[in-house]
Amino acid sequence: MQQGITIGNVSQASGVKVPTIRYYEQIGLLPSPPRTEGNRRSYDDRDLERLTFIRHSRELGFEIDEIRTLLSLQDQPNVSCEDADAIASRHLADVKQKIASLTALQHELERMVVGCSHGRVETCKVIDILADHGKCKYHGD
Amino acid sequence: MQQGITIGNVSQASGVKVPTIRYYEQIGLLPSPPRTEGNRRSYDDRDLERLTFIRHSRELGFEIDEIRTLLSLQDQPNVSCEDADAIASRHLADVKQKIASLTALQHELERMVVGCSHGRVETCKVIDILADHGKCKYHGD
DNA sequence: CTTGCTCCTCTAGTCACTAGAGGATGTACG
DNA sequence: CGTACATCCTCTAGTGACTAGAGGAGCAAG
């Protein structure tokens, strides 16, 4: 159990930027670590794990509040994991929805770029399609 | 060319919320319309078109600044559409990247939810996978 | 001992809105 | 003509998740 890791090192090791770590402390997502004599934050391996967990969750698109729940679950392993499951499932549905939307959007953009006459704006499909929603097949969020 | 449309009606017709329309005016994305005697904003069909263009572009994920460029292009049809093409192409690349990331994420979440033992947190894959980045195949944006 | 890096706190800015207060105006109905 | 009530007005402040910058203190190497 390594102790006394500087914020710079824990940042490097976790992949979370230094100001972001301080921000997480400020909003109570990461506990305030002890300080050295010179008032520097002094982290240990548990903090590093927690930060890695947070970064990974953020990358996967979970919101801070969801991560808060996930972290509190992690802290008490004897509890049912129904909540974690629910959060992940809801998120999965969101992600599927987003993929569907983006795929439609991709086709739309491809249609635009291919349709662009590479000439004057007058005849450019990109502008055209954006101006007239009716010509567009994309209707999701 | 209909004139004297209220903000509420232009909002309904364009699908852009009233406060958002005022916000667009504030940031100079939509020109300030004339006012009635009672100081109400009075829009016309051009404004409605412009708002529809903006909403559609936003739905497709373009940023305000990109829309600004697109709109200024739209205003001068004699200019080459290279810029519009470039914006759309760059955006298309982004979208493809996002789809790839989200698809990886989808698999990851499916793995989580399926792997969830529906029991205690101790043995729950959702928490497990989030805690240990090494077990994860997802490494995108 | 000095150079230069890392760290500290604090405030303010980002993006694209959204919410709410407090007040004026316009319209439909009796 | 009066009165509800919807819609409008301006203005300020809040959101989420950071990011940037000012101004200063501590620390390690040469």
Image (tube, coloured by chain):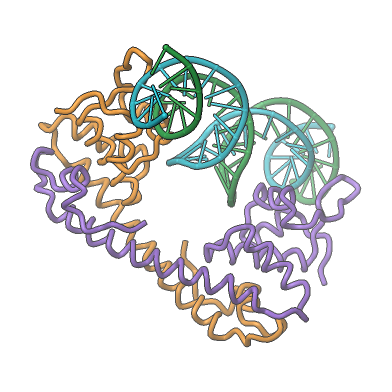
Chain colours: A purple, B orange, C cyan, D green
* B64 relative to A135 in the view: left or right: right
Residue B115, quarter of the rendered image = bottom right
Picture residue at 62% right of the left edge, 57% below the top: A64
Picture residue at 65% right of the left edge, 82% below the top: B124
Picture residue at 39% right of the left edge, 62% below the top: B98
Please state which of residues B5 and B124 is positioned toward the viewer in this rendering: B5
* B78 relative to A62 in the view: left or right: left
- Decide: is C22 above or below C5: above
Q: Which image quarter holds the C terminus of chain A?
A: bottom left
* A103 relative to B20 in the view: left or right: left
Please state which of residues B23 and B15 is positioned toward the viewer in this rendering: B15
Residue D19, quarter of the rendered image = top right
Q: Position of residue B107 (x, y in %)?
A: 46, 78
- Decide: is A87 above or below B56: below
Picture residue at 21% right of the left edge, 48% below the top: A133
Furthest toward the right, the residue is A37
* B39 relative to C8 in the view: left or right: left
